Amino acid sequence: MNQRYNTLVSDTLKAKELHRPEFFRLHNDSDRIKFNKLLDSSNIFLHDEIYDQLKELMKVHHPTVRLSADDYTRLIKEHLGKTDIKDYGVWVYYPWSCKLVHMLDEDEFIELRTSANRNKITTVERDLLAEKKIGIIGMSVGQSVSVTLALERICGELRLADFDTLELNNLNRIRTGVHNLGILKVYAVAREIAEIDPFLKTVCYPEGITEENINDFFTKDGKLDIVIDECDGVDMKILCRLKAKELHVPVLMEASDRGTFDVERFDLHPDRPILHGWLEHLTIDFEVLKSLTTAEEKLPYMVPISGLETLSSRMKASVIELQKTVTTWPQLASSVALGGGLCADTCRRILLDQFTDSGRYFLDLETLIPDKRPILSEIQYIKIVSPITIDEIKELSNIALKDIGPGDKKLTHDELKKLIDAAVQAPSAGNCQPWKWYYTNDCLLLFHDKSRSVSFGDFEDIGSHIAFGATIENLELEATANNIGVITHVFPIPDKTLVAVFSFTKKETQDLLYQPEILSKYIYTRETNRNFGVRKPIAKNTLDELRKAVVSISGAELIIRDSPEEMNALSDIIGGAERLRLLHPEGHYEFFKKELRWSYEHSRDSADGIDLATIKISASDIVGLQLIQDPGVVKLLREWKAGSSLEDLARKSVNSASAIALITMPQYSPANFIAGGRALERMWLKAAELDVSLQPMMSATFHFARLIHGNGQGMPGFMKEEFTQYYKKYEEIFPGIRNKGEVFLFRLCIAEKPEVKSYRIQTDKVLSFG
Ligand SMILES: Cc1cc2nc3c(=O)[nH]c(=O)nc-3n(C[C@H](O)[C@H](O)[C@H](O)COP(=O)(O)O)c2cc1C
């Protein structure tokens, strides 16, 4: 058995490259000898259906007559003349399958095989098309294109290029048999074409297209009339277009997603830039292109080619799952079949001068044949709050100022501006800057403008209250630096829209501030640092200094965790929280529509939100964000219980940090969060002084608050469950946390300084006078 097995394997291997049939015309003596020898070999399958072919041919020759059996016999006899039917036509031998087939010879074969094309393709057009040469690079969609071109007989020669072999996972879209596994795709396609039409010329490029053979591919034995690009390599995509442009050959490309289809008519418009000009901002030098090896390097080229925004949500979501739960870009047989049809139809019309345009087109079946059932919006519960009005501000001021009088100091306009300029440097979640300031009767009032902060994350205004604590701290520090005393009344009335009232005195320092002379110097340089760091321990005395700053606020505590086990567990928790936040329709909407600023101009003009440039992430991470911003994508990821890549950024941040720390207050209450915000700002300013970088990582904290204090209200079941699990782990890392006010979770790191600073809304836009 072993010997026999080995012989069979070796014989099959020898046959791997066979893709050309052999022809035997028996009126030719040498062919007859070879043919007879072949008949003697043992394992031949012989198919002789020549009589039926002749019958069909007679029918085509006499379209007006209904032929009887006798008519056929007579007509065929006349047609054969003296030739024995066994010798008529041609015998074609397919050596890879040992099949010997008797068929009509070339002219009659073509006439009969294409007879049902008429008159969608007339005989004159058929003959014109038979002169044409089409090159196809890449044999996935390319297989479908090539076979369709062959079936329709849109050309007389097909040049096929691909270096890949057939694998089982190709068989979801490439129509071939399992016996072809391991065979070069070009040969499988050439075989299939030969089995449909042995007279169609195929030329295979089993090494794919290379710099060395591209000239041959385009010009050997006559210039190509069309090239169809279905390859994956960005360098080849560009190289083949440069060549096509030089030789004035049109290029087609079908992307098997939403019927995305490109036509570039370099034959008619040789000056048009390749890929519709989408790469004009990049270097188009083949030496550079060849050297691109990593996905990261190729991305700037691939993104404009694939047109990220126009990909289907399923494709985007699948790309996000690459290397997580899937291994390759998905392609479906239906799309590939459609692609074959699209390319073949356009080729025919180009070759027959029935179509002259260039451009990107979509034959998106979901749009053309839509499901008309109404789509329920997923973000039905987004809260919209109107901005606070001056009338509301005045009304609340009047109530508060009944009990609070001015101090002995009246601020000048410059002094007031200085204080508020410093106050608004405070951090706020998503840089939402939830404040409005009002100066009246020599008192300054701080209001909560909920229209700026309302979000799924800001459960019970926790995030806003923390920001208010920080802004109050800055104001007092700046006042002290300017020899102005401040008396602060936090939540002076039950309505918490009024956060604080400040009156001013000539007293020079605030007794309760912590190191005001030092910390006030860092108000403008404190910043969130989202750069990845290097995990190095932070010196004990630095951590002690940070702790002292925190505990200077009564009741505040700082807990620092830096063991590898704790950091790993926190990476799971923080990463998981970021994922769940983005998978939640409201969290997703808020992050992409309210928080994130994609460009410098956008963040400068809005003067709020988080500038993407402050998140120093790789080009592929940015592409990931662009893909995830489609709500359809997160909906799918949710359904698939997938999306682990949404954790990657947060995980990298935690994994490159020196420690994760948490500020707590004794109670869960708005006043405690304000005080905690003050503690946080003290510590953050101290960190700026000591050159330690800091990044809040609050997704987990905010959602835990909703889970514990709001019974997970608004969270879908899976999210509640996962947060409950994460909270269990969290309690192990921070024992007793359930009974405290969790103010601020953040990472401490040693990292490069951020290149851009966050913007603030100008003081005159947030300050009014009464
Ligand atoms: C309560 C609160 C929560 C925050 N949460 C996060 C967070 O989860 N991730 C993050 O990168 N930054 C977070 N930040 C930082 C803000 O985005 C940042 O302060 C704001 O964009 C202004 O930038 P700056 O700190 O550099 O001045 C948070 C800030 C506050 C006050």
Image (cartoon, rainbow, N blue to C red):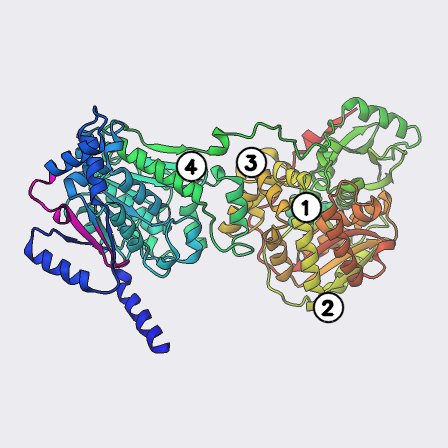
Name the secondary structure under disc 2: helix
Which of discs 1 and 3 lies nearer the camera? The answer is 1
Q: Whole-Å distance between the Cαs marked 4 and 2?
A: 60 Å
Three-letter code for the amino acid on which mark 1 is drawn = Arg
Q: CA distance from mark 2 to mark 3?
A: 41 Å
Q: Which residue is mark 4?
A: 259
Q: Which residue is mark 2?
A: 540
What is the C-alpha distance between the residues marked 1 and 3? 23 Å
Quarter of the picture holding the C terminus:
top right
Q: CA distance from mark 4 to mark 1?
A: 33 Å
Q: Which mark is in front, 1 or 2?
A: 1
What residue did someone put label 1 on? 581
Q: Determine contact: label 1, label 2, CB under 8 Å.
A: no
For the residues labelled 1 and 3, say whether their Cβ atoms are less than 8 Å apart.
no
Q: Is residue 342 left or right of residue 88?
A: right
Instruction: Give the percent coordinates (x, y) of residue 747.
Output: 68, 57
Q: Crowdedness of circle 3 by 10 Å Cα count: few (<14), some, many (20+)?
A: some
Earlier sequence position, callout 4 versus callout 1? 4
Q: Which residue is mark 3?
A: 602
CA gap between label 4 and label 3 equals 33 Å
The structure residue drawn at horizontal position 27% and vertical position 55%, both measured from the top left corner, is 210
Neighbours of disc 1 within 10 Å: few (<14), some (14-19), many (20+): many
User: Of label 1 and label 3, which has the lower sequence position?
Assistant: 1
Closer to viewer: mark 4 or mark 3: 4
Left or right: 503 in relation to 210: right
Distance between the Cα atoms at labels 1 and 2? 34 Å
Query: Which one is earlier in the sequence, the residue at label 4 or at label 3?
Result: 4
- For marks 4 and 2 on the same chain, the one whose residue lies earlier in the sequence: 4
